[in-house]
Every structure is written in C-alpha cells, then in structure tokens.
C-alpha cells in the first residue's frame, strides 16, 4: 500500500466503510486475512496489503491520525501529521528552458489531469461546499477512486517531467501533446537515442505485461494503455512526417510485479518498454533498443518539424 492518491485506501482494502465501528473493522480484517492468505489460494501481495491496511487504521490512535490526513506510514508509526498544505497540491510548472544544464521543455505536465481533477472534486463535494484546499488528503481519500486517479496521473506526469528536465541540454521535451487519435501523449522526448513517446501512469496497484498489453486490477476494463500510446505515436508521427523510435510507459517503482522493466518485442506494440520510474533517465539515454540497431536520424530536422506541428493541450 502506497500513499499515492490513486491507491486503494485502507478501508477499501478491508472492504468496509470509513464510518465502521472498531468491532466491524476488526471482523473485516480477520475476514480479509482468511480470503487473501496464500495458504488458502490468496495472493501474497493482497495479503500484505491487508496487513498494511490494518497497521494504518487498526487501532484508535493510528486510525484517528489517518482520518485527519496523515500518510499511511505516519499512521502506522503513530507520528503526527505535519502541518502545512498538502504536497499533492504542489503543481509542477514547465521546467525552465533558460538553464544550459536543463533539457528544453515545453507545455504544462499534468495540467490537463489536474484541471479535470479539480472540476470533478468540486462537483462531487457539492455546490456550496467549502473547498479551501481541494488537495487535503482526508478529502481526496473520501472521493471516488476515478477522481483520485486523475490526481495520481497529474503527479506521475509532473515527476516524470522533472526527471526529463534533468537529462540535460541534449534533450528536448514536449509535455501533454495532442494527437490525431484524441489521445494525449504525456511527453515526447527527443534526444541522442532517438524520438520517444512517453506515458506517465500510476494506477495505485501492481501491473504487468500480458500478451503485449498492460494488465492489473486497477486498470479499467476495456482500457489498453500500450495500444493507445502506440497508435497515438504512429498517427502523430505520420501527420508530422517523423518516426518514433519507441514508446515508454513509466510507472512507480513498486508497481511492476516481475522486474524493473518489461519490453514488448513482437506484434503490433513492439518497441514499447514499461519501466519503473527509477530507470527513466537510463532508458532515455540508451533508448529503446529492441531488434535492429539504432536508427540514424537528423535531430535538427525532427526538432523543427515537431516545433512547427506539435499542439499542446
């Protein structure tokens, strides 16, 4: 269990309402332990999540701290919540292009997702509700998960954008790019290793590749993140007269079930990597090397075409 706004809350993990009594909470915990125990056919990851949920809200002191907005880690240790604004409200602006040590960056990473989150959280809270801080953790945690996912998405994009900016002056980054398919590519990165389309994701749960597509309990039915990114990159590339050298989907470090990176080497989605966030810089510098040797390209021409044709949302 993580403190991502996209993650299931301890109450959701235990399958009980936040208003449940202490006895109801204890019974739910015991029931979920039996259901998820590996010896009875359950999942080790889910069993661990149930234990972490109980540590966060299992006793009155930690539960009270969590309900007031403490992180799950703080609630488990009983430490008080730090005062001040929620860290979820710290919006990342487009990194400055002035510094010679930074990559050139354009657009507002996570801006579209944040705007949608703010609209929906206010609609959900109701007309006339006092939302002096729409990012207040206790408020966000009480919202439906599809609203919380938008905030998690914005934070993921902002974290990726900061890492991309630190790659240096040999890179150019466009954030939140519109495509002919209607799908927004979170980041387009042009560097020595080629032109890459990058998505930043945080579903709040583990994910894995299966038959060329990402799967996971928190990925909504019918969604195909890999397919959507690949299609959007191909359509955009065709419209601009450029060729993408690969696609990369970035997820939190603890989200990949089997390894820190997984690649798709065959089929329509070939040339796609799913990587843990800690591997982002290394992959951007080395590129997506699947199959043939690295393609030669004119970086100046590609950059010019992108500058002239890219539309930021």
Image (spheres, rainbow, N blue to C red):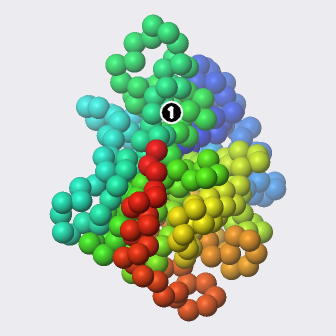
Residue 75 image-quadrant placement: top left
At a point 42% along the width and 82% down the height, the residue shown is 298
Residue 266 against residue 66 in the figure, above or below: below
- Compared to residue 256, the image places residue 154 above or below, namely above
In the picture as drawn, the residue positioned furthest to the left comes out as 99
- The residue that label 1 is drawn on is 116
Q: Residues within 10 Å of mark 1 (few under 14, many from 20)?
A: some
Residue that appears at 64% across and 24% down: 17
Horizontal placement of 65 versus 6: left or right? left
Q: Position of residue 65 (x, y in %)?
A: 41, 30
Choose between 179 and 292: the one closer to the eye: 179
Mark yes or no: residue 101 visible.
yes
273 or 237: which is nearer to us? 237
SS for callout 1: helix
Q: Residue furthest right?
A: 41
Which x, y percent locates residue 227?
69, 61
In percent of width and height, residue 312 lies at 44, 49
């Amino acid at each position: 269990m993580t403190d991502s706004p996209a993650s299931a809350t301890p109450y959701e993990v235990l399958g009980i309402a936040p208003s449940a009594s202490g006895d109801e909470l204890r019974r739910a915990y015991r029931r979920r332990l039996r259901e998820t125990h590996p010896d009875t056919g359950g999942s080790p990851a889910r069993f661990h999540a149930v234990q972490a949920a109980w540590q966060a809200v299992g006793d009155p002191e930690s539960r009270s701290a969590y309900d007031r907005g403490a992180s799950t880690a703080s609630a488990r240790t009983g430490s008080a919540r730090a005062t001040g604004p929620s860290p979820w409200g710290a919006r990342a602006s487009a990194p400055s292009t002035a510094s010679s040590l930074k990559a050139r960056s354009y657009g507002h990473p996570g801006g579209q997702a944040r705007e949608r989150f703010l609209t929906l959280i206010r609609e959900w809270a109701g007309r006339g509700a006092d939302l002096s801080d729409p990012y207040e953790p206790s408020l966000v945690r009480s919202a439906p998960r599809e609203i919380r996912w938008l905030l998690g998405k914005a934070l993921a994009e902002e974290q990726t954008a900061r890492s991309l900016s630190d790659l240096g002056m040999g890179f150019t980054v466009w954030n939140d790019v519109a495509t002919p398919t209607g799908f927004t590519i979170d980041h387009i990165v042009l560097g020595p290793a080629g032109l890459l389309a990058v998505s930043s994701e945080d579903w709040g749960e583990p994910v894995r590749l299966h038959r060329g597509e990402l799967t996971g309990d928190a990925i909504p039915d019918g969604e195909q993140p890999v397919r959507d990114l690949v299609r959007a990159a191909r359509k955009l590339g065709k419209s601009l007269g450029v060729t993408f050298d690969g696609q990369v989907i970035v997820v939190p470090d603890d989200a990949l079930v089997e390894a820190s990176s997984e690649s798709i080497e065959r089929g329509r989605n070939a040339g796609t990597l799913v990587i843990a966030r800690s591997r982002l810089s290394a992959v951007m510098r080395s590129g997506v090397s699947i199959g043939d040797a690295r393609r030669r390209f004119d970086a100046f021409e590609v950059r010019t075409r992108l500058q002239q044709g890219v539309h930021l949302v």
